[in-house]
Amino acid sequence: MTKRKASLGAAFDLMSEQAQDQILEQAGVVSSLPLEAILPDPAQPRQLLSSEIIQAIYKGELTPAAALQQWMQQGRDKNAAPALKRNVQELNRLADSIEKHGLINPISVRRSPKQVSAPAGVKYLIITGERRYWAHVLLTTEDRTIQEGVETRSPDRIKATIASEGISIRAHQIIENLLREDIDAIEKANGFVALRQELSGQDASVPSDEVNHGSPTELVTWKQVEDTLGVSKRYRIYVTSVLNLSDEAQAIIHAYGLTERAVRPVSQKLKKHPDLQVKALQQVVSWQQEGAGNDVPSQTITAAVDSLADTLLLREERRQLRASGEPTSEILGPEQLHSRVKSALRLFEQLGEPEMLGMAEALANSESSTSVVSDLQALEQYLNQLLDAVEEQKTTSE
């Protein structure tokens, strides 16, 4: 038996390993556990390696080290998805950090339940800290050591706290994932669904077909999920709505790591338009790639996608009107519109550069100017929609 906490006394060392675990989990003591006794939870809502690779480990077809090497090789492929490439790079950076400074935050594990068919020797499943675990596996496969102060140790053991069983395990996993800025919208939504299954006493590793907002008798209500996580009904609907998007749309979100905030307008406004979902998400991906390395606020991204969704809907409505042959009603004719546009232009032409800067400063610093800024943004959106429609008409008539 490996001595794990000498400070607990000789009597502790004479206990069985199960008895030691029970004391450690009650005390919340950090243990040093062998990597070979730990595996990622197959029901984890957010997994670093693909579910196919994790299943191969549980079937005994791959060792964790071989599985990690296979996953990293996939990430080095020139045609690999950007999210996969990014995850491989981040894992390498994490391993470098642990090698130089040690593991600052221990992982948390639970004893593997009987219903989970784990490989021989596996006693614990990871609750939180899967990336830290894989960083240790990477260091082990590369024969690297960990420097902690003046001590040098092998990465084949990892600091961990042993948690007691209970439904809070699934909540713990999801809450930690919710705190991550890089979690994609599909992973987050699947986490909510997994928690609902957990609270209902179902096997959370089995995908649920029920992703709508009703309350079937075999599952607890969504309110119980919301109360467990401390989130509003509105936010929960935002999160789970992405699972109602088309399969192609969901694949784009997951492949490019798009966040829930970024795709919210798509899931809310384009839920009945699968083709427009894909078109909008492809544009979001293009923006993401163009702005790589720039720290763009999430509110700005959401506003841009919201405007894009409105534009796509307007184009679709006009296309359907043309296809139906019904005449479109005109509130203003071209001459009346021109007159009003010229009036607005004269107003701005009277403002020189100093006056324009002064106006911008006043609008930016005055709380009472919020409605003015909102109206200007709405005007910009309508003008863009009109100009886009004009270009579309020109293309159609050519």
Image (cartoon, helix red, strand yellow):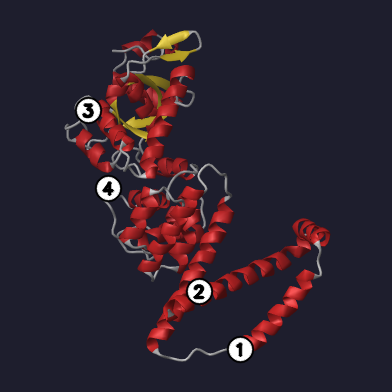
Check residue 203 in the rendering and tell me which mark sits there, or answer none. 4
How many marks are shown on the rendered structure?
4
Q: Position of residue 92 (x, y in %)?
A: 40, 28
Of the image marks 2 and 3, the number of the one nearer the N terminus: 3
Which label's residue is closer to the chain start, 1 or 4?
4
Identify the mark nearer the N-term, 3 or 4. Answer: 3
**Among the two numbered marks 3 and 1 on one chain, the one whose residue lies closer to the N terminus:** 3
Q: Nearer the viewer, mark 3 or mark 1?
A: 1
| Residue lying at 27% horizontally and 23% vertically, measured from the top left | 36
Amino acid on which disc 2 is placed: Glu
**What is the three-letter code of the residue carrying label 1?**
Gly
Confirm or deny contact between disc 3 and disc 4 (CB under 8 A). Answer: no
Quarter of the image that includes the C terminus: bottom left
Front position among marks 1 and 2: 2
Q: CA distance from mark 2 to mark 3?
A: 58 Å
User: Left or right of 248: which side holds 329?
Assistant: right
Give the residue type at disc 4.
Asp
Label 2 environment density (alpha carbons within 10 Å; few <14, some 14–19, many ≥20): few
Three-letter amino acid code at disc 3?
Answer: Thr
Q: Nearer the viewer, residue 96 or 120?
A: 96
- Give the residue at mark 3: 63
Of 339 and 307, which appears nearest the observer?
Answer: 339
* Of the image marks 2 and 4, the number of the one nearer the N terminus: 4
Snapshot quadrant of residue 75: top left
How far across and down, in percent of the image, does residue 278 sit? 38, 62
Give me the C-alpha separation between circle 3 and circle 1.
71 Å
- Residue 98 location (% of width, % of height): 45, 22
Q: Quadrant of residue 380?
A: bottom right
**267 shown above or below 205:** below
Question: Element at badge 2?
Answer: helix
Residue annotated with mark 2: 391
Q: Secondary structure at mark 1?
A: loop
